Image: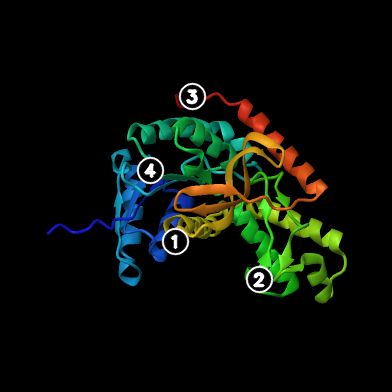
Amino acid sequence: MNKISSVRKVVIIGCGFVGSTIAYTLMIKGLFSKMVLIDANKERAEGEAMDISHGLLFSHPMDIIAGDYDDIADANMIIITAGANQKPGETRLDLVKKNTAIFATIIPEIKKRNYKGIILVVANPVDILTKVAQDMSGLPEGHVFGSGTVLDTARLRYLLGEHLQIDPRSIHAFIIGEHGDSEIPVWSSANVAGVPIHEFCEMRGFFNHDQSMRDIGENVKNSAYEIIQKKKATYYGIGMAISRICSAVMRDEESILPVSTSLHNDFGIDGVTVSMPAIVGGNGVERIVPISLSYEENKKLSASAELLKSTLASLDYKKSE
């Protein structure tokens, strides 16, 4: 009697700090039964697979191997972290041409294997590289999306929790737009357990709302730069953020997460991939959530989208036919 296949397979392309941390967090989470690590440095992938496998006794059964592109055809998800690292003083957009060239070698290999699953882009600048991956892969747009501002939103809620001395899981607020310098905290609809954020701040004795919003927004935006300055890379936070996104897909949770996805006349924006709250489930991104924005937030979102669109227009890459 043949066994019923219950293989849940993930492929991680890129085994640097971010890729290996994602692999570790996914091993701990137990969402998948098989993990394949691919890296230009095959020995690095082999070493990471060995190291993480040695902890399986304390986690969930899983087959973890170093592989190649021939291993991707039957994967449920492919997570792409491969790319040049962001250096101190360098913006995410500074990376764009280097990492677009790297994607021009990765995505055709995926397409060549007739892959039909989900592609999750993590490499920066994530919003632009998500659009590049969509254009190159030929997959449905909802099947190719980026990690977006999931981590930025977590940082916002964490800092608000610290500010208000409450559990950040009770805070509902999003960072939208570019995962980068033009990102926008959505204060107009932010709330704590349904109480508008300004009202809750006053309950806790805080009244200087404008200054607090500016300070917290700047701290969120600069978090990655500060971490990179101090320890050369940021990887634990994004590792946990990717684990959360994978959970939404593999468990078909239909969770609302601010991921990088294409807008088509949503919020007056068309033809660009930005980070917006969206319903994420087994088929990837199902739809954008039409959250309420103030006039000023909408204006900033349009400016962020235009920045990304102009950067995308400067790139030269071959789209899927």
Residue at mark 2: 170
Give the residue type at disc 2: Ser
What is the secondary structure assignment of the residue under circle 2?
Answer: helix
- Return the disc, 4 or 3, that comes first in the chain's sequence: 4
Quadrant of the rendered structure where residue 80 is?
top left
Give the residue type at disc 1: Thr
Is residue 222 in sight in this rendering?
no
Q: Residue furthest right?
A: 208
Gap between marks 4 and 3 measured at Cα? 23 Å
Gap between marks 2 and 4 measured at Cα? 39 Å
Closest to the camera, between mark 1 and mark 2, is 2
Q: Are marks 1 and 2 in contact (CB under 8 Å)?
A: no
- Return the disc, 1 or 3, that comes first in the chain's sequence: 1
Q: Residues within 10 Å of mark 1 (few under 14, many from 20)?
A: many
Closest to the camera, between mark 1 and mark 4, is 1
- Return the disc, 3 or 2, that comes first in the chain's sequence: 2
Residue at mark 3: 318
Gap between marks 3 and 2 measured at Cα? 44 Å
Give the residue type at disc 3: Lys
Quadrant of the rendered structure where residue 7 is?
bottom left
Q: Are marks 3 and 2 in contact (CB under 8 Å)?
A: no
What is the secondary structure assignment of the residue under circle 4?
Answer: loop
